Image: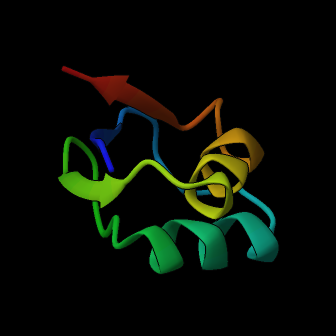
Amino acid sequence: MATIKIKQVKSRINCPAVQKRTLDALGLRKMNHVVEHENTPAIMGMVNAVRHLVKIVD
């Protein structure tokens, strides 16, 4: 399956706790951190939940 790279582009400060847990589950720890995951429906659902904080990069 294809992989996607996810980059955190906005700070987690003042975000609800559930969004902070989602970022932790994705493996994003700080700004401009990039992680690579398989492109599965579960991962895309997590990305969709924090879409205002992250960006999918090539």
In the visual, does 20 lie left or right of 17? left
Horizontal side of residue 47 vs 45, given as left or right: left
The outermost residue toward the top is 58
Residue 28 position, x and y percent, is 34, 64
Q: Is residue 2 above or below residue 25?
A: above
Residue 43: percent from left, percent from top: 56, 58
Q: Residue at x 30, y 40 (%)?
A: 4
Is 3 left, or right, of 14 in this rendering? left
Q: Nearer the viewer, residue 36 or 14?
A: 36
The number of numbered discs placed on residues in the rendered structure image is: 0
In the drawing, does residue 28 fall left or right of residue 11? Answer: left
Residue 38, x across and y down, in percent: 35, 57
Q: Which residue is rendered at x = 27% and y = 47% of the image?
A: 31
Position of 57 relative to 33 (above/below): above
Query: Residue 50: where, in percent of width, then height?
Result: 67, 45
Quadrant containing the C terminus in the rendered view: top left
Along the line of sight, the residue nearer the viewer: 25 or 14:
25
Q: Residue at x 19, y 51 (%)?
A: 33
- What's the image's color scheme? rainbow
Identified at 45% across, 36% down, the residue is 10
